[in-house]
Amino acid sequence: MKKSIFNSLIKISEKHYLLYNAFSDTFLILSPALKKQWEENKPENLSTKNKTFNDLLIKGAFIVNSTLDEFLELEKKIKTIIYDENNFHLIINPTLNCNFKCWYCYETHSCSKMNKEIMDRTKKFISHTINSSFLKHFHLSFFGGEPLLYFKDIVSPLIEYTYKECQLKQKLFSLSFTSNGFLINDEILTVIKQCQKCHASFQITLDGCREDHDKVRYVNSEKGSYDTILNNVKQLIKNHIHVILRINYTSQNIDKISKILDDLKDPIFQNNEYLTINFQRVWQDISQEKDISLLVDQTINLFKQHKLKVIYHYSDRMRNPCYADKKNEAIINYNGNIYKCTATDFDKTERYGFLNEDGNIIWENDKHQKRLNTILNNLPCQKCRIAPLCAGGCAQRGTEHIHNEYCLYNYDEKFKDKLILDKFENKFLQPNK
């Protein structure tokens, strides 16, 4: 027997230590005495010194067979999910137009709208995919631009078509939107609710408190969008539609984000299984020299104290890989071009292929397979104790670093410990558990 390469031991108080295995996703809280036994004994000695402790260590994969190639097992498990044929995730960009012009947006909001020809091709693709004998679950997502701009013309017909196809073929159907949330109305809610027993969700963003948000997302010089968006979030929750409320923070707005709590005092927001708060730093702000990590932690703790479920730095890519890393995932742009990742410029030079007249994806230049081949090829990941959590980074980063080693977390061991502690808190100490 041997100790797993995926173990981490973290001090959490004067009398408690957290032992975590990233492959089994198992936590053990150790006393100083057990911590000493763990550190000072070889696996073969633990069974005689403390059989109960030893049995827990084996059950949690903290101790594994000496001949086991743990990284190979990790690779097998990840690829089983990456190449899963039972699920398909289709993301559609009805348009790249948007009703807001956020300063950090990486997209070019040119005049764009999916036409009838591309809609027909998309419907054919949906039918082909749902007809697969392997498929059990079809997940339809809408991205953009702002996808709700053309809800009646494009989004609603595609939802209704896909739902009927899934019903006809007895396949599970789920639905999600990445939206700024401003245009949500009763018509949209009605269409979603007509998809009975369908898991539906929205990711909606606030750019800080009302004052800061309305400087970024505004209708005109006299009207912001904060109050409308927050009210629409409330309507979604009331209709049992899941919302990930993403709060974008920067070094300039983090000190005022706690003001949002004043607007979340309504009981509908608190301890609600349909609401999750997700803190994300605007990536253009990451290069700022100002260290705001302590302020971020304090702000997040305030949200948790108000009975709100919060996700921050949560990562478990072995069990739940990024949508864009999976083989059975594609983005159909408004013009029929095919992509894999939404965090990209939807330029023709970046496309992975296109949708032909028969509704089939034509993958170009073997880019799709090359992307899949980057998974777990990054050498530092093969020696990392939390490799199951980041699963070798993301395929997009992999394609950008084919000849260069990298780490998603900048080789920061303290930050890796923080990821584990955040995961522990999300799993055991959050509301709605």
Image (cartoon, rainbow, N blue to C red):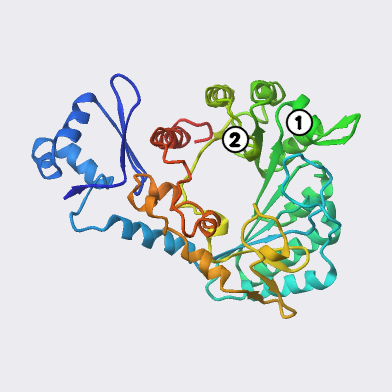
- Report, in whole angstroms, how far the alpha carbon at label 2 lies from the one at label 1: 21 Å
- For this view, does 317 lie left or right of residue 47? right
Q: Residues within 10 Å of mark 2 (few under 14, many from 20)?
A: few
Q: Residue at x 35, y 25 (%)?
A: 12
Give residue 258's quadrant in the image: top right
Identify the image quadrant of residue 105: top right
Q: What type is the residue that disc 1 sits on?
A: His
Whether residue 226 can be seen here: no
**SS label for mark 1:** helix
Mark 1 surroundings within 10 Å by alpha-carbon count, few (fewer than 14), some (14 through 19), many (20 or more): many
- Where is residue 404? Give x, y as percent: 46, 54
Query: In the figure, 358 relative to 81: above or below?
Result: below
Which sits in the foreground, 284 or 82? Answer: 284
Residue 76 placement: quadrant: bottom left
Q: Are marks 2 and 1 in contact (CB under 8 Å)?
A: no
Residue at image coords 78%, 50%: 146
Q: Name the residue under label 2.
A: 287
Q: Image check: 415 left or right of 89? A: left
**In the rendered image of this protein, does residue 125 appear above or below residue 340?**
below
Q: Which of marks 2 and 1 is nearer the N terminus?
A: 1
Check disc 1 and report the residue beneath it: 213
Q: Residue furthest bottom?
A: 358
Say if residue 364 shows up in the picture: yes
Residue 53 horizontal/vertical position (percent): 19, 37
Residue 58 to residue 353: above or below: above
Furthest-top residue in this view: 14
| Amino acid tagged 2 | Ser
